[in-house]
Image: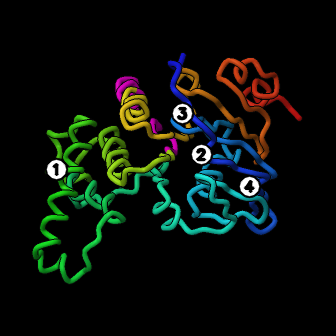
Amino acid sequence: MSQTRNVGDVILNVENVSLAFGGVKAITEVSFDVREHEIRAIIGPNGAGKSSMLNVINGVYHPQQGSITFKGLTRSDVDSHEAAKQGIARTFQNIALFKGMTVLDNIMTGRNLKMRCNFLQQALWIGPARREEMEHRRQVEEVIDFLEIQHIRKTPVGRLPYGLQKRVELARALAAEPEMLLLDEPMAGMNVEEKQDMCRFVLDVNDHFGTTIVLIEHDMGVVMDISDRVVVLEYGRKIADGTPDEVRGNQKVIDAYLGVAH
């Protein structure tokens, strides 16, 4: 089971959120909160609305109803760039890296929001731009060391096996120094050894950086091992919310996963 962490106050509050595409309801009146420093899992069968919920949290989708409160600031309409500036970083179900660029250059793109120099200064690489670039590289090298990917730092991402690409994507998200990290199926498509590595890194990120983590994951063993609390969605509605033990024993959750007729 997950270790006891120094979980703090509520950092994210999802309140009565509904999202529809045309006549199709993706999320219906869902509410839950996330506390500082916790690992919060969102689970549910395929089509439950999990990725849509992450997209609402980081401003990709705008809900027709409800609000998101992050660090005390309530919003119903914000774009993903603004969410990133507020301190929310995201990885994706399908890896969204620049396949022709090296690992180092991919991770450097995670520092874009932190860059202060203008385009001309960066292009000429003069004074302040050079100092800024060196500082960003130092931060990126720390992330590379932390995730143990020094040996591939100069390798084009497209040449890497899937598990390492997932780790590079995590590194790019961490380079932005987020307060909250949204992980969309970080272990999908991995073998057992790769999953164990990723579990360890997720726990280490949470522990070392104090990063609050919200993750979607299909592997129930992983969810039950590393999560502090779990919210369960089915057909876009919340059917359970609690500790891993509480959720594991919930009959609605058991029925949802076993496909019991409704």
Q: Which residue is mark 3?
A: 39
- Of the two numbered discs 3 and 4 on the same chain, state the one appearing first in sequence: 4
Q: Residues within 10 Å of mark 4 (few under 14, many from 20)?
A: many
Q: Amino acid at mark 3?
A: Ile
Q: Earlier in the sequence, mark 2 or mark 1?
A: 2
Number of residues whose C-alpha sits closer than 10 Å to that of mark 2, classed few (under 14), some (14–19) or many (20 or more): some
Q: What's the residue at 75%, 51% (across, down)?
A: 15
Residue 63: image location, x then y, percent: 72, 63
Local secondary structure at mark 3: strand
Is the Cβ of the residue at disc 1 closer than 8 Å to that at disc 4?
Answer: no
Left/right placement of residue 24 relative to residue 171 reads right
Residue marked by disc 4: 26
**Boundaries of the magenta span:** 183-199
Quarter the N terminus occupies: top right
| Three-letter code for the amino acid on which mark 4 is drawn | Ala
According to the image, what is the colour scheme of the structure?
A: rainbow
CA separation in Å, label 1 and label 4: 39 Å
Circle 3 or circle 4, nearest the eye: 3
Q: Is residue 90 above or below residue 152?
A: below
Residue 226 drawn at (x, y percent): 51, 25
**Along the line of sight, which residue is nearer the eye, 60 or 140?**
140
Q: Nearer the viewer, residue 77 or 239?
A: 77
Question: Taking 223 as reference, is 90 left or right?
Answer: left
Q: Earlier in the sequence, mark 3 or mark 1?
A: 3
Query: Mark 2 falls on what kind of element?
Result: strand
- Do the residues under discs 2 and 3 have CB atoms within 8 angstroms? no
Disc 2 or 3, which lies upstream in sequence? 2
**N-term-proximal mark, 1 vs 4:** 4
